[in-house]
Amino acid sequence: MSAVATERASAVVIEGVWKFYGDFPALRDIQLAADPGSCLALIGRNGAGKTTLLRIVAGFSRPGRGKIKIFGAEPREAETRRKMGFIGHGISVYDELSAFENLKLFARLYGLVDPRKSALEWLERTGLERVRDGLVREFSRGMRQRLAVARAFLHEPSVLLLDEPFTALDDRAIAVLQRLLREALAAGKTIVMSTHQLREALELASHVALLNRGQVAFHGPCTPEMVADPGYVYARYGESS
Amino acid sequence: MNFARNVLVIAVKDLRAEIRTKEAINASFAFALVILLLFSFAFDPEAETTREISGGLLWIVFAFAGTLVLNRSFARELPNDCLDALIAAPISGAALYLGKALANYVLVLAMELVSLPVFAIFNNVTRPVSQQIWPILLVIALGTWGLTVIGTIFSALTVNIRLREVMLPMLTYPILVPALMGAMLMTSSLVMGKPLAGDNLTWLKMLVGFDLIYTAASLALVEIVLVG
């Protein structure tokens, strides 16, 4: 398939991406792609470049070299951002606003037709409807995480970029997130997630990419061996091999 | 239309957050009042020279107390990585910047409108200030916009720096010199009973030009400041 055809067919294309911090190359010639309806799990040790890569894909920083295409368009285009949902290390909601105000704010920023209705719908889907008017600073950690999930899914994104999505989640939040991610995959949406929680991630992943010191050490379909033994990829393709 | 709506959404969000926490505005009000009180001890309110330097005193208070508001502008987005969510949203960097600048303008202006009568009473210039209130308010409105646009863009630039509270004034004040100088001279001149004509009009035009140029430059550069 030609490069142009690949760009059109793939939801996310990462083409020859380098990122430098000073002279240090944090990412080195990364080539990856994710098709619609697939889930790409980015795994690797701390400092391997997973978060840097996800932030470049999300358009938070620009690559030193190479390019990113989301459905054939640049990540910083407004239409592309409308198609993307991001969950990072922080929950990205305001402590001094209520859950409802937070979701209504983001619904407005994403230009949703009825921000109030969308906000209420997602409060219900994440089990937060009873605390809708409570300030986020008064929420438990699990409730805050569920609100973060609601914020990321609120505008029904076609591409979900998740940085360590299962880290520090309580059981209920993990269950909510996994259910939503399965529904998203069933609806043909694309997920790219970085994770250390291999068991949860590999249950969802269709493809796995192992990053090692800023390079792709392995990229391929997620096999039953990987699901059965989450350490398999590290053992076979990681630094110790 | 979308641009204006997004600007308004961001401005309302910032104002709502500030009204609930009162982090910046309390610090700014308190600082302004303390400095005004200290100035009233330092300078003889009966002396003619106090009137001559009144503009300088007033704008020193506005600039320093205003920086406390401006420092919080983008720093407010740091807890919970909220800035990421704003950058990820399909709004232009210019709309995000202008929304924040608008909220800052309202907050700084509120501090100034409280400080102005206090300043007038402490320095015994109540009558000249009330006689020239509209020209003085015009100067304050224009000078504050200059302070706000520069402060907001540098707040975005320094948001990830550990010493941002120190860096923001260090970067902001040198660029603000022409605007502050104009605002100071015009305010002093107005307090001394001179009309908004002649030299004052020239300074006013300069202040309008300063505001327009730095607003346009900030709107053009904010995307690079936020994303690189």
Image (cartoon, coloured by chain):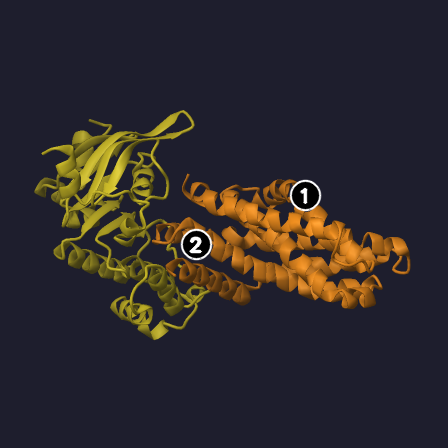
Chain colours: A yellow, B orange
Residue visible at 35% across and 37% down? A62
Q: Position of residue B123 (x, y in %)?
A: 83, 61
Judged from this view, the residue extending furthest toward the top is A23
Q: Is residue B224 above or below residue A85?
A: above
Front in this rendered view, residue A195 or B141: B141
Q: Nearer the viewer, residue B60 or B29?
A: B60
Rendered-image quadrant of the C terminus of chain B: top left
Horizontal side of residue B200 vs A133, given as left or right: right
Q: Residue furthest front?
A: B198
Using residue A86 as the reference point, say whether residue A102 is left or right of it.
right
Query: How many callouts does the rendering have?
Result: 2
Q: CA distance from mark 1 to mark 2?
A: 27 Å
* Residue hosting label 2: B95
User: For the residue marked with disc 2, what is the amino acid?
Assistant: Ala
Point out the residue furthest to the right here.
B47
User: Do marks 1 and 2 share a subunit?
Assistant: yes
Quarter that holds the N terminus of chain B: bottom left
Tell me which amino acid carries mark 1: Val
Q: Where is residue A187 drawn, in percent x and y?
A: 14, 57
* Residue that carries the numbered disc 1 in the rendered image: B177
Tell me the number on the disc at residue B1: none
Most foreground residue, B21 or A59:
A59
Q: Chain of mark 1?
A: B
Picture quadrant of residue A11: top left
Indicate which disc, 1 or 2, sits on the residue closer to the N terminus: 2
Few, some or many residues within 10 Å of mark 2 (<14, 14–19, 20+): many
Q: Residue furthest bottom?
A: A130
Residue B18: where, in percent of width, then height? 53, 63
Q: Is residue B23 visible?
A: no
